[in-house]
Amino acid sequence: MPAIDEVVRRYGGALARIAGSYERTPVGREDLVQDIVIALMQALPKFRGDSALGTFVYRVATNQAIDRLARRSPAMLDIDAAVDVPDPEPGPDARYGEQARRERLLAAIRSLPLSLRQVITLVLEGLSHAEIASILGITENNVAVRANRARAALRERLQGDAR
């Protein structure tokens, strides 16, 4: 059984990116990452090795994010009503432009229906369709369909932002 320190070191960046696709604010993302790490600490002793460690970690992270969404009040789920908290640290223009593009992408991902958001988040992490199917409990064909729909929806949303 791998130690939690090893898991966090190996998958910490991915956990932060997954949290970013579900949480709008930096504080919310940090809280979700902490919740995911706690869930991993509780779940690791039960890991039997039936799947790859990464698959197990992504499944726990995704389930934790969905549980967090389910616990929210309906008012908190309204993306249009949410207020952006600006980053208090100004950076160089290049970093700002990259940050703005990243935030636009994350906002577009957060605006997707949950079934598409789950798939595209894991696709962006570089997981195969087979791994995503295993994590989400759906078929590989369904993963492919959802990934294509998510890409199309993101393209539409991001092109709409550029206009």
Image (cartoon, rainbow, N blue to C red):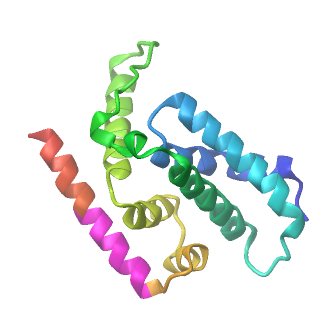
Measured from the top left, where is residue 59 in percent x and y?
64, 66
Q: In this view, does 134 lie above or below 154?
A: below
Q: How many labels does the image show?
A: 0
- Residue at the image point whose x is 73% and y is 52% from the top: 10
Measured from the top left, where is residue 18 in percent x and y?
54, 51
Q: Which sits in the foreground, 66 or 70?
A: 70
| Dominant secondary-structure state across the stretch colored magenta | helix
Residue 64 relative to residue 38: left or right = left
Residue 98 lies in quadrant:
top left
Measured from the top left, where is residue 131 in percent x and y?
58, 76
Residue 5 relative to residue 72: left or right = right
- The N terminus: image quadrant: bottom right
- 147 falls in the magenta region: yes
Residue 30 relative to residue 5: left or right = left
- Residue at the image point whose x is 48% and y is 86% from the top: 139
Q: In this view, does 38 lie above or below 126?
A: above
- The region drawn magenta spans 141-152
- Residue at the image point whose x is 54% and y is 73% from the top: 132
Residue 91 lies in quadrant:
top left
- 44 falls in the magenta region: no
- The C terminus: image quadrant: top left
Q: Which sits in the foreground, 101 or 75?
A: 75
- Residue at the image point whose x is 46% and y is 44% from the top: 73
Residue 2 lies in quadrant:
bottom right
Measured from the top left, where is residue 153 in percent x and y?
24, 60
